[in-house]
Image: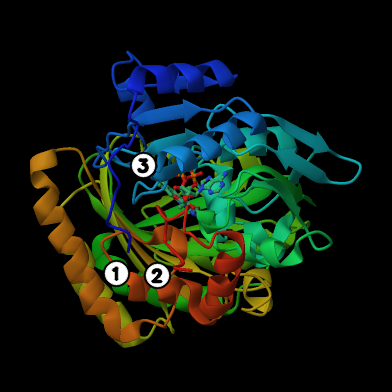
Amino acid sequence: MVTTTKKSQVTNPLLTWKKLRSTLTGTLILPDSEKYDESRAIWNGMIDRKPACIVQCADVNDVVTAVKFARKQGLLVAVKGGGHNAAGFAMCDDGIVIDLSNMKTLEVDPKTKTAIAQPGVLWGEFDAATQQHGLAVTGGAVSTTGIAGLTLGGGVGWLMGKYGATCDNLRSAEIVTAEGKILKASPEENPDLFWAIRGGGGNFGIVTSFEFQLHTVGTIIGGMVLHPMEKIEEVLKFFRTFTQNAPDELTAYAFTMTSPEGMQMAGIALCYCGEDLNEGEKLIAPLREFGPPLADLIGPMPYLQQQSMLDATVPHGQFSYWKANQLTSLSDEAIEIFKTQAPSATSPRTMVLIEHHHGAINNVTPDATAFSQRRSPYDFVIISLWDQPEESEIHIKWTRDFFEAMKPFFSAGVYVNTLFNDEGSDRVKSAYGDNYNRLRELKRKYDPNNFFRWNNNIVP
Ligand SMILES: Cc1cc2nc3c(=O)[nH]c(=O)nc-3n(C[C@H](O)[C@H](O)[C@H](O)COP(=O)(O)OP(=O)(O)OC[C@H]3O[C@@H](n4cnc5c(N)ncnc54)[C@H](O)[C@@H]3O)c2cc1C
């Protein structure tokens, strides 16, 4: 856990800021700027941090300039890609925010089925560009999430059963190190760094370019079925059998949520990305027949539609608190606890997910990349959401209580991109699993002074 922030040490502010501004192609935002408040607002409305400055980088040179400036001034550094990290690591108090959100160049090469993207690109933008060529890579399930933080933490999504984690499809990256050097990381160049950034988050440098391997993805079968909350036990038991028999092309999540009309529901959302949609329809038939559901919203659809279907449920600026852990299995006992806890959700905006992880993402050995969470069949994720600040305590307590009750069913692992920064260093170690020691060695090599420490930190 990182709790310390360092006060700005800028000694001669006017001169210092003027000099920094004159060396940037991008924009320097200071607390007295009109744009300061909008520039420090990120996805989680609960995060209200006030940095000494925000450097909105235009290119890799700006990133180098900002890194060198931060070193000279002894400032804490936060790095912002899409700004979606729920714990709010994209913003810090008093330090410098190196904001990459304007760096949005994206090139797709349909011949080699590759894409090169800058770190400000969001999944909706990435998918729209790659889908023009009938291509895609495993990406986040919400289109406003950034490609950068998600890929560096591992990356799970609807295509993971077939095509693996997002980081499994990373071919190379360009990185600005803590010294301000620009390095390439790939299987051929700095392979140890390439290993570390595929799951090690922002610990090793600032990635200014990602090269991805893409895959052919056309029309998929996607959507969800919805049942009343009273059926939660049957839904989860059905989900268990359904997922145990699922081929790699089929990825499904069970969830609970409340409809805009206030009805509590349990559902199953899915994506079938196989070539033969008739085969997909056959596989999905039992899901449609089971219940029957209150609503069956499943059908063939463009992949882009699937990738934005959850957007409205998680708008920017809501207050949010998460707790997550992987499960060893979905036992009857785990279902019983889930059934007791989920309906007592204190906020109607809250969602609880059980994601099925299988196929390509779990077929990679856990030490092949820094992302090691590849053995558990399910990931349990509580996403509490609300919009009244005075309600925070009650919703956070409910989230923690549900999490505690599910502990007997947890495996050792937690996905790093779901961690909050109040969880302690042991939880951070659990996220990196058996790879933690190697990550520490590489941290000593690439960032011995822990310049990049405002993250799920690997202590050198
Ligand atoms: C609504 C919602 C839905 C989500 N859905 C999914 C999902 O389907 N699958 C999934 O895997 N995750 C999902 N996530 C989690 C997501 O992976 C993380 O929130 C991730 O950090 C988002 O990346 P970002 O660039 O938007 O984040 P930011 O908040 O901008 O960055 C988070 C951290 O990542 C690091 N970082 C970001 N960019 C760089 C860079 N270029 N170089 C070095 N370090 C960098 C920094 O430490 C930074 O503080 C979801 C999150 C939300 C809020």
Picture coordinates of residue 210, whole percent (x, y):
69, 46
Tag 3: residue type?
Thr
Q: Secondary structure at mark 2?
A: helix
The answer to which quarter of the image holds residue 251 is bottom right
| Residue at (42, 64) in percent of width and height | 254
Q: Residues within 10 Å of mark 2 (few under 14, many from 20)?
A: many
Residue 205 location (% of width, % of height): 58, 51
| SS assignment at label 3 | helix
- In the image, residue 126 sits, relative to residue 455, either above or below, namely above
Label located before the other in sequence (3 or 2): 3
Q: Quadrant of the N terminus?
A: bottom left
Q: What residue is disc 3 on?
A: 313
State whether label 3 is within 8 Å of ligand 1. no
Q: Which residue is mark 2?
A: 428
Q: Amino acid at mark 1?
A: Gly
Colouring rule applied to residues: rainbow
Front residue (pair 2, 90): 2
* Left or right of residue 376, residue 405 in this image: left
Which residue is most to the front? 12
Q: Which residue is mark 1?
A: 424
Residue in view at x 40 percent, y 81 percent: 330
Relative to residue 374, is residue 359 drawn left or right?
A: right
Q: Nearer the viewer, residue 264 or 164?
A: 164
Report the Cα–Cα distance between label 3 and label 2.
28 Å
Image point (61%, 73%), residue name = 246
* Residue 11 lies in quadrant: top left
Q: Is residue 175 above or below residue 399?
A: above
* Coordinates of residue 85 in the picture (x, y in percent): 41, 48
**Amino acid tagged 2:** Val
Mark 3 or mark 1, which has the lower sequence index?
3
